[in-house]
Image: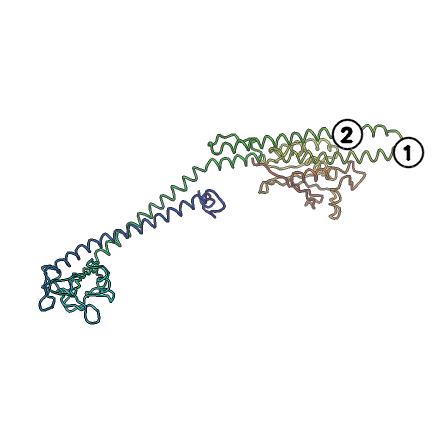
């Protein structure tokens, strides 16, 4: 599960799963943030509207009781217990413009005592522009700078030409506290909802794209030789892709088989004339027969060389053969111990049963057989073989002997075709070169070095198939 999270929540641009999860998560986050902000704002506005209704009622009552005497505004105390208690949190005031256009308070509630009603400098213009409607704003009151909601309205009174501004204020601490509590609960609920939605998106995308992962696994099995075709049933959206992949595999197999057929035909077509030429020169002496014989041998060696590489390349590009390394080593060891029984050669080999070569058995037999035969030819009595996986889809075969070894400056030379270090030792000089050619065809590597046993160590790196 941890590997899945690390794999699917990395950079969004490199994976369809990550891209879908990131896009859905970003949309959920934006939607939840907007929802939380709107809900909190609407809750606060609802509370302020309730306060606004209370303040408008206070202003209406002030307008009803206000009178004008000798061009002076007279406003008796209204029957509201909170406006009669000092610093109670509810206040009112009546103001008129002075000679400079500022508002001057001409009457106030008992609750204000000797404090001033908070009147911003822009209020005269705002109430004038409102044309009798109520103007609201936030301010701080006289009781320890309590937060206030203030409403003001400009009215005309009978018997007075100049308008009068009626102002009412009330403590909004309860509204602010309720708003904070509502916001906290809202964000907690939205956070839990967002986490649940993101988890649901992850599992939905993961389950929805599971057929793609299964298809990728099947393709990997085909590439590693554990399967030859795409065999599972997939949804209608992916089924055409699986069908096209199977057609591609079939076409590739046809191409490989066609290459093998062409290689076999070419081998037969070339080897027969060469054999006839060699047969005709047998028993004849002279310069011309010798030249024909020598060049025919060279031509046959070149034909063998290129045909072998062509066959190996075709096999390496095939649908994925799997060969058990331990079986081939056991077979080769038994056979060569019998061949070299007169010399008492012992072959000690070690290989895991599950180790698999990704290639054809015949090619592995030829590579291992040539290396083992070379080791047996030069060894005194002991040959050791070890094989194992080295990771990254590769395996390593190490073949060592207790013979005289090989100088470092001659190791590249023995990989060339026809090179023989000692004419007294039987052989054609083609063994190591054949191994090198087949190894390269499988994109492997043959390396020669010094063995701890005193002789030569051949290290053969080849592609491995998963067990």
Give the left or right position of residue 348, taking residue 3 as reference: right
The answer to which quarter of the image holds residue 134 is bottom left
Tell which of 180 and 162 is nearer to you.
162
- Taking the spot 75% from the left edge, 44% from the top edge, the residue there is 413
In x, y percent, where is residue 395?
61, 40
User: To which residue does mark 2 refer?
Assistant: 271
- Measuring 22% from the left and 53% from the top, which residue is drawn there? 47
403 to 161, vertically: above or below: above
Q: Is residue 94 left or right of residue 235?
A: left
Indicate which label's residue lies in the foreground, 1 or 2.
2
Residue at the extreme bottom of the image, as rendered: 99
Q: How many circles with numbers are drawn on the protein? A: 2
- Residue at position x 67%, y 40% in the image: 440
Quarter placement of the N terminus = top left
Name which quarter of the figure residue 387 lies in.
Answer: top right
Which of the pair 458/110 is nearer the observer? 110
Secondary structure at numbered mark 2 = helix
In the rendered image, which residue does mark 1 sit on? Answer: 286
């Amino acid at each position: 599960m941890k590997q899945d999270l690390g794999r699917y929540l990395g950079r969004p641009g490199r994976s369809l799963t990550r891209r879908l999860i990131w896009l859905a998560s970003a949309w959920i986050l934006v939607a939840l943030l907007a929802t939380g902000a709107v809900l909190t704002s609407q809750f606060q506005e609802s509370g302020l509207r309730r306060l606004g209704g209370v303040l408008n009622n206070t202003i209406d009552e002030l307008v009803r009781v206000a009178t004008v005497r000798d061009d002076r505004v007279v406003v008796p105390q209204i029957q509201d217990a909170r406006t009669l208690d000092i610093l109670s949190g509810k206040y009112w005031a009546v103001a008129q413009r002075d000679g400079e256009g500022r508002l001057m308070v001409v009457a106030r509630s008992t609750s204000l005592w000797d404090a001033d009603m908070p009147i911003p400098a822009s209020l005269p213009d705002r109430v004038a522009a409102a044309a009798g409607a109520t103007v609201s704003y936030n301010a701080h009151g006289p009781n320890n700078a309590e937060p206030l909601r203030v409403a003001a309205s400009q009215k005309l009174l009978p018997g007075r030409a100049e308008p009068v501004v009626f102002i009412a204020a009330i403590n909004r601490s309860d509204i602010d506290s309720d708003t904070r509590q509502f916001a906290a609960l809202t964000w907690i609920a939205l956070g839990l909802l967002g986490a649940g939605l993101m988890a649901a998106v992850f599992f939905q995308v993961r389950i929805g794209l599971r057929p793609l992962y299964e298809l990728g696994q099947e393709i990997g099995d085909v590439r590693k030789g554990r399967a030859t075709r795409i065999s599972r049933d997939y949804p209608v959206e992916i089924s055409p892709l699986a069908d096209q992949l199977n057609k591609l595999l079939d076409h590739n197999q046809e191409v490989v088989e066609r290459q093998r057929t062409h290689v076999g035909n070419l081998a037969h077509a070339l080897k027969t004339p060469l054999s006839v030429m060699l047969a005709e020169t047998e028993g004849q002496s002279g310069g011309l027969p010798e030249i024909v014989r020598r060049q025919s041998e060279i031509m046959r060696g070149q034909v063998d060389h290129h045909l072998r590489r062509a066959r190996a390349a075709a096999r390496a590009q095939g649908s994925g053969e799997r060969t058990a390394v331990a079986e081939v080593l056991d077979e080769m060891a038994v056979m060569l111990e019998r061949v070299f029984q007169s010399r008492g050669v012992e072959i000690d080999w070690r290989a895991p049963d599950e180790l698999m070569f990704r290639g054809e058995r015949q090619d592995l037999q030829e590579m291992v057989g040539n290396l083992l035969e070379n080791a047996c030819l030069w060894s005194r009595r002991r040959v050791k073989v070890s094989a194992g996986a080295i990771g990254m889809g590769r395996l390593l075969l190490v073949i060592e002997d207790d013979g005289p070894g090989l100088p470092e400056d001659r190791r590249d030379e023995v990989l060339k075709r026809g090179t023989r270090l000692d004419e007294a030792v039987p052989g054609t000089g083609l063994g190591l070169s054949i191994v090198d050619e087949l190894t390269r065809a499988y994109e492997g590597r043959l390396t020669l070095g010094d063995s701890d046993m005193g002789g030569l160590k051949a290290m053969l790196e080849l592609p491995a198939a998963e067990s």
